Amino acid sequence: MTPRDVDIIRRRLCIAATGTTLAAPLAAIATSPRREAAAIVGPRYAGHAAIAAFAAEVGARRELPVRWLLGRLDQARRNDAVRRLIAPPPAGTPKNWRAYRERFVEPRRVAAGLAFWHAHEAALNEAEARFGVPPEIVLGIVGVETFYGRIMGSFRVVDALATLAFDHPPVPPARRDRSAFFRSELEEFFVWCAREGNDPLAPLGSYAGAMGLPQFMPSSINRYAIDFDGDGRIDLVGNGADVAGSVARYLAEFGWKAGLATHYAAVPPAAPDALAVLREKDILPTFSAAQMVERGVGLDERARAHEGLLAFVELENGGDAPTHVAGSTNFYAITRYNWSSYYAMAVIELAGALKAGR
């Protein structure tokens, strides 16, 4: 952070504190009927043992006023709904790709996506020219994430992040405690609020603290969000151009390559040992097409000609036979948005439906 950045932040904090103005694109959405705030439950964090230390560390590290940080953190509240929602599903819960797909690839969502495409066609085309990501992939992500802005979350972000930072629920032995991750996101949230002049008590988002149409976490907003239309601010709630550019930039930063297929159909090998080896790497591209064929995977001609590494992806279908695909590095890039092969395939299938609808 440069001295100029620090000066800008301090001036904006002073303005916000006096109530003169609040340049808060997300704050404005707080009064929208579709985004009515979730009920405030649980105690305030005022006096919590970890708050003072957190504010002191973040203040020193990011050159933010400690009193401002403490004043906002004192008003954050623990939200037990957040603690319930972040918990993993019960062990043994069956996955079903077909049922998952039906939630997202359905007529109303496709119609909304086509309307968004029509409204922001120029920005989507420009994003593709600059970052190599096709419009339908950007739209697939926004559609899966928030139904094109219809479902952006109703939790106060400061409550959600504070709850997960300081009162993260216990995790099973096989899973890691993510409270450190959420403390980092809470820090990034305050950095973003300070830079943009936002009141930290205003923004709403998901139970995990993600915001806007693309559901960026605060760190992603700070690193990847872009003022794509050049109006001087980044707005991921009301500005379709900024949404298009930011999502495309995010995917490009995580390795998206223009013109590369996302995946190919794959037939699993008959040998259990070979199947186990392929499954072990999950969504990480590890094998060449030739190596997959050597291990007994059935690939068509187009897949066999693929240059680069592939992942052997298995999608369970409840009690029915799984669906298998060979995922490319572009498939993997989509999973950097959400670490799930089911998520990536839903984005790709919705994108395909949108492209067909054009």
Image: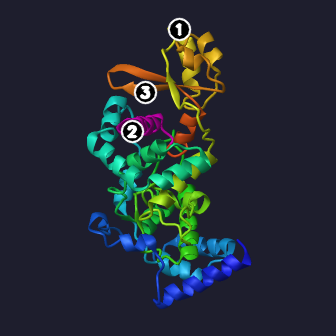
Q: What amino acid is found at the position of numbered circle 1 in the picture?
A: Ala
Q: What amino acid is found at the position of numbered circle 3 in the picture?
A: Leu
Look at mark 3 in the image and give the residue it sits on. 315
Look at mark 1 in the image and give the residue it sits on. 271
Image check: 269 left or right of 151?
A: right
- Say if mark 3 contacts mark 2, CB within 8 Å: no
Camera-nearest label, 1 or 3: 3
Q: Secondary structure at mark 2?
A: helix
Camera-nearest label, 2 or 1: 2
Q: Residue at 53% of width from left, 70% of height from top?
A: 231
Badge 3, how many Cα within 10 Å: few under 14, some, many 20+? some
Chain-order first, disc 2 or disc 1:
1
Q: Quadrant of the C terminus?
A: top left
Q: Secondary structure at mark 1?
A: loop
Disc number for residue 350: 2
In the image, residue 115 above or below residue 294 = below
Mark pair 2, 1: CA separation? 33 Å
Residue ranking furthest to the right: 3
Magenta residues span 339-358
Chain-order first, disc 3 or disc 2:
3
